[in-house]
Image (spheres, grey):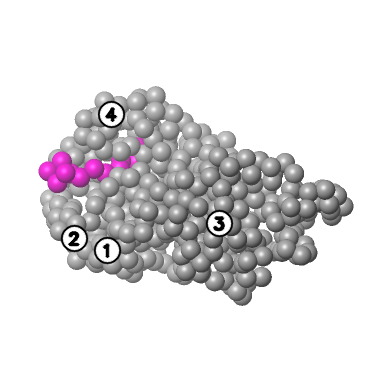
Amino acid sequence: MDAGTLALAKSYTNTQIVSKMDAINANHFFADDTARDAYFASTPTEKVVGVLVSSNDVYQMWNGTAWVVKTPVSGVAKSDFNGVIAQLAENANEGIRRAEINNARKPLVTFTYDGTYAECLNILVPIFTSKGVKVTFGIQTGQIGGLGMLTAEGILALQDTHGHEIASHSVNHPSLPTSTIIDCEYELFESKKILEDMGCNVNHFFYPQGDYNETVINLTRKYYKTAALAANPPELGEAVGRYNNVPPINTYKLLRKAMAAPGGNPSLTTLKSHVDSAFENNAWLIFYAHGIDYKDNATEQQVLSDLIDYIQSLNIDIVTLNEGYSAFANKVDIGYFGRNKWSMADVWPYDYMGSHYMVGCDGTVKFSDVESIKDYTIAIPNAYSASDLITEYPINKITTFRVNTEN
């Protein structure tokens, strides 16, 4: 998308933006050149914000003297264009707030646990309580009340008594990409409904078995703010820094680093190295394990305790998944990128593929087809003013910059 289009939002208040976007959606999308030219012949002053979107997804922008064809940056389809504009309008004021917060972005750590194991309440909660830490438990609702599993009362105690967060981990823990669409949506919707009917606040999802594809992600977006992976991709291994979630985050493929797993537990030294990387890069690091990993395992219990002590010694905040998301959420997040699942071709940066346009909490922009963009510039803050027309921007370039005031 042309930077001039994005600049529409910067000249108006939030209310005015919504009004302006409504006007654009109503009047500035045309079926053909004749309809476009007829409209602008009667309203020449509106040309600066004119957009022509033809049936074959070709965008034309008014450059001040003529209409020029613009290939959509990031491959965002016409069907997604309104979504981009709507998010810009919706996030106008929120974006200012986040920019102020993230000018001094700081590292965060989140602990997450998959499954409905009773050890979450009996073993893990006492450790977290002693450290003053809140975490996120992903509940598989089909396990509730089973042998060695949490009851509904125990799950509510995690949230209401101890202040921890509840996420969904599906109903039956199937591989969602191999499920039918009906079954997949059932797992996503029903698990959330069961937990919410119990009194839980549920905003996030952990993919069962770590499996996903584009269909699964699109369905997940209907019900949850984020979704997280559930396994260490073998291609990433133990490489330090590969598990850092940094702006713009991959909202429905959040990276998590295993603390304890059947295949072998990383050492405290290794876990500390990942914390050090998050600290150095002001990243959001998400750890995960299963409650049962700590059953009759004094060694792993001590590793967890020592890891928390180390994180706190660095003055890194340990937050729930929802708190981490609030700090790192993208301002704009349109489309989908990433292959269906991890493959040997997914070498770092493994996930910047496909059709996706994102603006991170700190203003960082990422989009697909990055190699085809020859002229991408980042201007200094306030390089342009709110009164600048599109003609003030460099032609045939994508310009990104931060405006430090509401105007």
> How far apart are labels 4 and 2 at the CA level?
32 Å
Residue at image position (39%, 28%) is: 196
Cα distance between the residues tagged 3 and 1: 36 Å
Numbered disc 4: secondary structure? helix
Q: Amino acid at mark 3?
A: Ala
Which label's residue is closer to the chain start, 3 or 4?
A: 4
Disc 2 or disc 3, which is closer to the eye?
A: 3
What residue is at 78 percent from the left and 49 percent from the top? Answer: 43
Question: SS class of the residue under badge 2?
Answer: loop
The residue tagged with tag 1: helix, strand or loop? helix
Three-letter amino acid code at disc 2?
Leu
Badge 2, how many Cα within 10 Å: few under 14, some, many 20+? few
Calculate the distance from the C-alpha at mark 1 to the C-alpha at mark 4: 33 Å
Nearer to us in this view, 54 or 398: 398
> Label 2: which residue?
314
Residue 88, labelled with which disc?
none
